[in-house]
Amino acid sequence: MSEGIITAIITAVSTLLVTFVTCYFTIKKDREKQIEEIKGILNNHRDEYLGMIRDVQDDITNVNSTVQQQIAIIELKIDTLSERVDKHNSVIERTFKLEQASAVHETKLSNIEHSIDELKDK
């Protein structure tokens, strides 16, 4: 082979090698840039999602507080209602006793009237 052909081959191989190395590092640099961009996007979304999670936690805390307040109000109403039911039951018990006493008195009165009628007849 002639020296000119060998030089041409070496130049072509060198150019090919330089082109390959340049492409490799360009691609590597682009990949690193893309990876950094992806990391940035993920970090932005991470911050977004963390903010959303904090908002949801705040909402849960607010709902929990509201539920606790409503439970306290319901318990107070139940206690008040229980007192009223107890008073009502007390009135019913006294009314029942009065009705029993009234029935006894009516029976006694009826017996007395009957005795008076018998005495009149004699």
Image (cartoon, grey):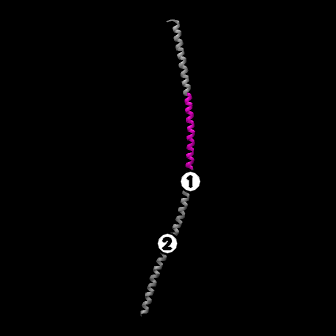
Q: Looking at the picture, how far across and down is residue 73, in whole percent?
A: 55, 59
Quadrant that contains the C terminus: bottom left
Q: Find residue 97 and name its label.
A: none
Q: Residue at label 1?
A: 66
Which type of secondary structure does the marked residue at label 2 adopt?
helix
Give amino acid for label 2: Ile
Left or right: where 104 falls relative to 45 = left
Residue with the most extreme bottom position: 122
Q: Nearer the viewer, mark 2 or mark 1?
A: 1
Q: Looking at the picture, how far across and down is residue 39, in whole percent?
A: 56, 33
Is residue 18 covered in magenta?
Answer: no
Which type of secondary structure does the marked residue at label 1 adopt?
helix
Q: Find residue 92 and name its label.
A: 2
Q: Residue at x 56, y 53 (%)?
A: 66
Give amino acid for label 1: Thr
Q: Looking at the picture, how far across and down is residue 46, in whole percent?
A: 56, 38
Q: Residue at x 57, y 40 (%)?
A: 48
* Cα distance in 3D space between marks 2 and 1: 38 Å
Do labels 2 and 1 touch, CB within 8 Å?
A: no
Residue with the most extreme top position: 2
Q: Residues within 10 Å of mark 1 (few under 14, many from 20)?
A: few
Which SS does the magenta portion mostly show? helix
Q: Residue at x 43, y 88 (%)?
A: 115
Disc nearer the start of the sequence (2/1): 1
Q: Nearer the viewer, residue 49 or 99?
A: 49
Left or right: where 99 falls relative to 69 = left
Q: Residues within 10 Å of mark 2 (few under 14, many from 20)?
A: few
Q: Quadrant of residue 77?
A: bottom right
Q: Looking at the picture, how far across and down is residue 81, in whole percent?
A: 53, 64
The region drawn magenta spans 32-61
